[in-house]
Structure formats: structure tokens, C-alpha cells
Amino acid sequence: MGRVLLSGNEAVAQGAWEAGATVGVGYPGTPSTQALEHFATLPGVHAEWAPNEKVALEVAAGASFAGARSLVTMKHVGLNVAADPLFTIAYTGVRGGLVIFVADDPGMHSSQNEQDSHNYAAFARVPMLDPSDSAEALAFTKRAFEISEQFDVPVLVRSVVRLSHAKSLVETGARIDPPPVGPLKPDPAKWVMMPAMARCRRADLDTRMEKLSAFAATTDLNRAEYRDAALGVVCSGVCYQHVREALPDASVLKLGLTFPLSVDLIDQFASRVDRLIVVEEADAYLERSLRALGVQVSPSGLPVAGEITPGAIRSAMGLPAPVLREKDHTLPPRPPLMCPGCPHRPVFHALRKIKAVVTGDIGCYTLGALKPLAAMDTCVCMGASVGMAHGAELAGGVDGRPIIGVIGDSTFAHSGITGLLNTVYNGGGGTIAILDNRITAMTGHQGNPVDGITLQGRTVRELDLEALCRTLGVTRVRTVDPHDLSATENALREETSVEDLSVLIFRAPCALLVKDKGSPYAVDEDACTACGACIRLGCPAIGKDERTGKATIDVALCVGCSQCVQVCRFDAIVHTGPACDLGEV
Amino acid sequence: MSATTVMLCGVGGQGTILAADLLAKVAAASGLEVKLSEVHGMAQRGGSVDTVVRFGDEVHSPVTDPGCVDHLVAFEIIEAMRRIHFVKPDGRLLVNNRTIQPLPVLTGDVAPQHGLEAALEAEGAIFVDAEVLACRAGSPKSANVVLMGALSTGLPFEVSTWTRIIAARVPPKTVESNLRAFELGREACMKGECGL
């Protein structure tokens, strides 16, 4: 206890723990991941990764039904996956408090789209809390559990990158014993959503929403701050902090509860300011809602897409910009790239060589779309690679080129299995490559059913991918070590030359998991012909001498994986000693 | 004090997040409000990254804008130049004397940029040989802590606070080399040795 520096994610976990939550379930996704990871480290809780967000919410709903306070965590696109149970759990309501933490990614730092989860709150009719810093993330999460039980609803707590991955000081407190929910009695009218019961619960949900709207008018989660009456700003979450920074004199209506809204509260604020604007990012949820309530909203002039900053607000308000040093527009871009020794690299290297049409998926391997590998044609959502490969085949293929769906281990467990089942069921062909690097890598190394690593270190059996694919009905299932470049290329050529559906499992651990690095390689300058074959692997450790055009290897980055040795036709890449012996770093 | 804004930038994997965490903890331990903002995920895989730390008596936004940074600590020369317009005209510019060519340059898709050191020097950059000093301290991976040592000479925090926070935050086996790295970064800046 005391004042500590916590990220928004950690603060949500701490808040759930202080509220007495005993169950936490989620699926990793930037920027939400550390919430459940942190929750799992706190005493007296059961925390686990589910294969996907739908399952996570269903597990938490079961825990709530049985009386436990439970936390579910996911990123914004995960809420799409969990939307099915969400809409109906809004009807059933809860027993133990049920809080769904969802982290949006305005600006798409690490996401395939930019959606505003406020819309889900309004769509499913589930209250949403919007904390603006870590201290509120903790406090609001605690309140969310109380609101959930008081109004018999699941509650959404929304975050964004600048809350989840921002740190600020937080006063932590003790864990409480939540009020008992009483013994579980059969109650099909509440819990069995057949049409007759669901119709009643639908009406009941409207009643619960009316009560919540009344609550919204008086709760201290919402706060009007009256300063200069010339401008009033309605905002929520981190946008509140940007507004306070940019417009210190403006009056502000800070909404902590962004669904449902109280028309009385907003009318009262609007009546006390000359001009009212809304500041929000990635969508115009609040502005649309206010207009629908009949509130006069002036245009803010802010862009709808992307993240906003204090500077963007000042600029939209026509305030003077700071004096700037001249920006250098000629710098080379620095896209992210696969790590040295990454087992995904040889697969994309081979896919490029065989001129495959590649339907891709979500994970580190999406980087295979970038130059110089440039061997991925699509990336849509978790699991889409499998279905899209089948769809491309149904359309008659693409210029007779092999069609390959590429998906990671965790993504396959998340949403790839049903896609594969569909291809088998409908007699499809093609090849699916499962890149099994033994971990959910992109989000920072979380366990998953394929590697059998659990969030709290329980010993479980790992999924037998080969047996699963055969059981689904795939007859051609092969396992390949991707670090063997010729075996990788041969397997891809062979499997794409037959009509039958095949699954290739490329299995090698994520390079960041390999503790014993091989000794680094170096380039024999006399043997190197500057052909560029190794550079086209796109390894960060391999550079090019500007003068000679010959390859160079950064011994500090090289992990000795030998992928470049295998593409060199001149035996110009040779072993050297460890980094410190060379006196270089 | 009004809020001070420090931006740390570099290439994903260079240790900017740990360095920012040290700075934020030092500011908090010195009794100030502090906010830190970073980006995880895709960008961390060798991409261009930055982390912002803001501290003072009152801090609202965790992010910053062009023309608003008091101290830029760049772990790499190209990334320093990429953020130059964020630094206030009278802001401080500390640059690790290291260039990591981005992949588009290595593959020949984009021409390399020359003369960045001179351009940064003209902007008032102070260069630090962080990797060399880190090796001298006994740990090539402590370049980020060398840079925090250099940064510390321009911030109002006690050295004892820094050393206490560093000792508590880095792996136990590396406490000594990291404290030495901090000291070397600090000394280099104070003696003016870190200029080119």
C-alpha cells in the first residue's frame, strides 16, 4: 500500500483485486495485455488466458453466475469476438460483479483497425466507465464491480493506449470482501435466454438502463468543472487530460460514465457555457450522442481519425503554435521487422521464392508483408488467413499460383481451427502453414493452448497440433523445422503441388525465447561477392558496407541462427568469436 | 515547478522503456507528479520508438507535441533527427553516437542519409558514446543507463535518488555495472567529454 507508479493496465488489475475479484480471464492484445498479466500476480486470484475473447467472456460470465466477482480483459477487436455473449449477458445480468476491460487503439499503434468501443456500450446497452489516468483506472474498476452488482449488468471499463501504457502515481489500498451474493437458486427467467424469457429480460434491461440514466445524473463519476464560461468542453478518458493541458481555462464536463448519459447533467452544463464542443478521438460517439439528446454542439475542428494530443486541440482552437525547429523530411523510414534468428523469416523467404499467394494473419509474422520479404497479400483479422485461402480457391485461384494461408500458433487456436474445419468440410484444397513459435509473441510472450504454458504456471498438456489437424480431417500434415531453409522450401513446393488440403507446421521457438544464442557469424570479405542474397532475408543483424556493397554482420545482434549461411552461395559467412572479444558492441 | 517533458527515442529493443521507467521513478521519488507514455506491440520489433516522461507539480497529458520537449534523449542518430522538431528551441538534445541503418537503406530501397551528425551538432546536440562507456562499465547492455547518467546532469534530482532507483530496478547481478554506467554517463557529460 502507498503511492506507486502504475500503468493504466496494472491499475485496472489492482482495482479488480481490491474489489475482491477472484477470477480473471482474457486474451492478450495490445494495449490490454498487462492488465490480466498483473492481475495474475496478485494473491488469491485465479487468472487464465482463454483461446479467444468469446471464451474468456463466457468463462467470466460463468464465474459471475456462480457468484464470483470476475474480470475479463481484451483489446478493442477482441470485443468483436466477444460481442455474441456480451449482448445476451446484458439481458441476463450478473450475480457476482462482471467487469469487461477493453483497450482501444486510436492511431493504430498495434492494430488492424481503429474502433471506438463506446459504440458497443450503447449497442449492447452495457454501462461504460472511462478512466483518465491510472488512479482513476483503479478507482473506476472498483466502482465498476459495485455498479455491476447494484444494477445487475456487466460493466465495460474502457482504456486507450495512452491510459493502458501510460504510468502515473496511484494510491493502492486493501482488498475487500465483496458483499455476499446469496445462495444460487434456479432462475431460468433470468439465466435461460429462450425467446419467452429473453423478451422479459429485454424489458427488464430497459428498466435497468432507466435506473442507470438516473444514476448518471448524480454520480460523482461525472464531474462539471466550471471555469471560463466562454467555452465548455465535454470529454472523457485521457482526452480529459489533453483538454486540461491544452485549454486550462475552459469549463469541462468530464464524463466518467460515458454510457448511459444523463440529458439533465449535459443540459445543465450546456446552459452555463456560451459555446460547447466535444473532444474525443477515433470516432464521434459523444458528439453524436449529445446531438441525439438535443444538445447544441459546435464543431471542434479536430480530426475524427487517429489520436489527439494537446497540440491538436490548441491548433483546432486557433491558439498560437509553439516555435518549431525544422523537421527533416528526407529521413529513411524505419518500419518494424522480424528479430534476428526469427523462425518466421525462412518461411516468407521461401513463400516469395515460390511466388505464392499468401493470405496472412495477425501476429509478428504479419511483418512478412514488408520488404524485403514482401510475401503476404492479405491481413484482416484473427483467423482470416484460413477462410480467405479457401475463398480465393473458390474464386478459381490467382493466375495458377499456389494459395497458402499463414497463421501463428496462438492465432490458430484463437480462430483458425473453425476455418480449417470449414475447408475440410467443404472439400477445399490448398495449404495452411501454421507458424508454431511456441508462444504468443507479438503481445510480449503469453502462453497459449498450443504451447501448454498457462498464465499462473499450472502444468497442463500442450495441444497436439498434428493430431488436431488430422482429426479435423486433413490427411497431409507435416512438421518442418523452419531454420532448415531447403527443407522449408521443399515442403512448401511439394505440398502446393498436390490438390489435397495440406497443413505444414513450421515449429521452432520464438528467437527471443532461445536463451542459448549461437556464436555470431561474420562475413569473409574476400569471399563475399556483394550479391545481396543474405540482405534480402531482412535480418536486422545484416548490413551493407556502403563503399564495397558487401555484407556486414553486427556481432552484437547476430544470434547465430545460420539462416544467412544457408542462402550464401559463396561460403562467405563464417563463424567468429563472441561479441566482447572483438572489442565491439 | 511547471511540467518538464523528456522524450526518449530510439530503435525498438534499445532499452528506452527501462530508461524511461527509471526516470519516472526518480521523479516520483523526488516528490513530483509524473506521467509516462510508451507504445508496445508491433513498433517494438526494431521500429522507430519513443517514450515520453513528464514531471512537475501538476501534469495532465501523458503525451507531448512538436515544439514542447525540454530534453530529447536519442539512443540513435537517425531517430534523433526524426524527432528534432519536438525539441523546444532552447531544449537540450542528448544523442547516443550510434547509427543503426534501417532495413530499407540496407536493402537499397532508400538512399542512406549523410551528414546527420553535423546537422545535429548545429542543432546543439551533445553526443555521448554510450555503447563504449557501457562496455567500459562492464555491461554492453547498459548503454541506456549511461544515457540516463548524461541526462541526469540537466535535471534537478539527487544522484543518490538515481542510484537507489537503478539498484532496485535492474537485475541484481548487473547493479554494479549499471551504477558504474550511470556514473560514466554523468562524468562524460560534466567533463564535456561527450561532445564530438
Image (cartoon, coloured by chain):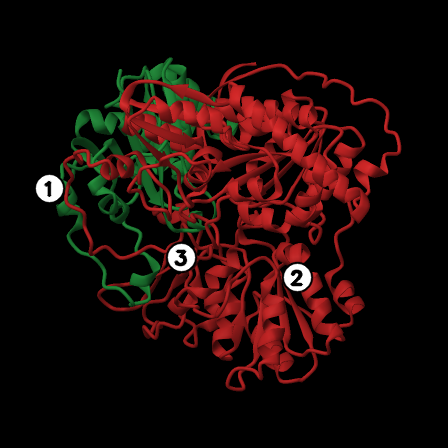
Residue tagged by mark 3? Answer: A541
Chain of residue at mark 3: A
Camera-side mark, 2 or 3: 2
Question: In this structure image, what is the colour of chain B?
Answer: green
User: Which of A199/A526 is in front?
Assistant: A199
The x, y position of residue A547, in whole percent, is: 22, 65
Total marks shown come to 3
Q: Quadrant of residue A520?
A: bottom left
Instruction: From the viewer's perspective, tell me whether residue A213 is left or right of residue A555.
Output: right
Residue at 54% across, 65% down: A360
Quadrant of the image for the N terminus of chain A?
Answer: top right
Chain that the image shows in red: A
Residue B33 rendering spot, x and y as whole percentages? 37, 18
Q: Are the numbered discs 1 and 2 placed on the same chain, yes or no?
A: no
Report how far apart the C-alphas of labels 2 and 3 lie in the structure. Answer: 33 Å
Task: Report the Cα–Cα distance between label 1 and label 2.
Answer: 54 Å
- Residue A463 lies, with reference to residue A40, above or below; the image says below
Task: State the residue position of label 2.
Answer: A416
The local crowd at label 3, few if under 14, some if 14 to 19, many if 20 or more residues have their Cα within 10 Å, is many
Using the image, name the chain to which the residue with label 2 belongs: A
Q: What element carries label 2?
A: helix
Q: Which amino acid does label 3 sit on?
A: Ala
Residue A487 visible in the displayed image: no
Do marks 1 and 3 both belong to one polypeptide chain? no
Query: Which residue is labeled 1 in the image?
Result: B122
Q: Is mark 3 on a helix, strand or loop?
A: loop
